Image (cartoon, rainbow, N blue to C red):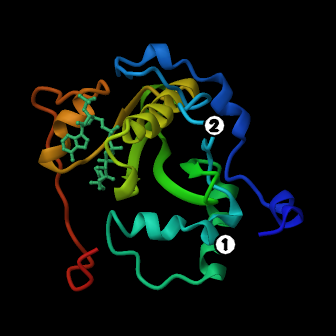
Amino acid sequence: MSSNKEEQELYLYDPSLLLKLDFYRSPAKFNPPITCVAPGEPWLKVRPLKSGDYRRGFLQILSQLTSIGEISEVQFLNRFAEMRAKGDYYVTVIEDLRKNKIIGSATLVIERKFIHSCGNRAHLEDVVVDDTYRGKQLGKLIVVTVTCLAEYLGCYKMSLECKDKLIAFYRSIGYVDEPGNSNSMTLRYDKQANL
Ligand SMILES: CC(C)(COP(=O)(O)OP(=O)(O)OC[C@H]1O[C@@H](n2cnc3c(N)ncnc32)[C@H](O)[C@@H]1OP(=O)(O)O)[C@@H](O)C(=O)NCCC(=O)NCCS
């Protein structure tokens, strides 16, 4: 990708938001200490999704999470534009700058409510780290980043659904099972697709 093309790329959301996050508010422990601004290596970058990330393997990363289907670059850009226009989607990625490649992602979605004085509720979605980069705190880093971002944006709570084996992972970041209020139920419209 030429630098001229890179300059024309759009961010999904304002990247300066990530400079304002206070990682010390999170109960997550990092050893050695890292944050989204200083992720531990000069070649690691935490940032909003960009319009050029189709060519940086963003969808290949998501395919390590679930089935993604055949998605053309045009389809990707249309969905990117929809999310950007809505303004409630904070897809956040980690890039390996040496390889110009996306190696991790997590999405914060903000749901606007009438309840809680027209409050905003945050949802954590689509957390994944490339399998060759796992075990280096990057999963924790990307989840804490979007978790702090939700708080910074004024959400009153953030919730997620996860596989049983990841409960310990999310507990270490401060997520709890609320007594009497931690069920997750699903009605599938896509039984054939098994999405
Ligand atoms: C879950 C995932 C994002 C974790 O990424 P990672 O970079 O390996 O995680 P980290 O190195 O930051 O690990 C943070 C902590 O969680 C623990 N952990 C990580 N993956 C775990 C797993 N699959 N099961 C249990 N614990 C796990 C680590 O041991 C570590 O513990 P510590 O802080 O006590 O040392 C990654 O394994 C992944 O992408 N999995 C496939 C997709 C997926 O299942 N996503 C979650 C959907 S809810």
Quick one: label 1, few (<14), some, or many (20+) residues within 10 Å? some
User: Closest to the observer: 107 or 99?
Assistant: 99
User: Closest to the observer: 80 or 121?
Assistant: 80
Which residue lies under the disc numbered 2? 42
- For marks 1 and 2, the one nearer the N-term is 2
| Residue at 26 percent of width and 76 percent of height | 189
Amino acid under label 1?
Answer: Leu
Which residue lies under the disc numbered 1? 77
Q: Which image quarter holds the C terminus?
A: bottom left
> Is residue 91 visible in the rendered structure shown here?
no
> Is residue 154 visible in the rendered structure shown here?
yes
Position in image of residue 64 (x %, y %)? 35, 65
Q: Quick one: which residue is furthest to the right in this view? A: 4
Amino acid under label 2?
Answer: Pro
Q: Secondary structure at mark 2?
A: loop
Drawn side of residue 195 relative to residue 106, left or right: left
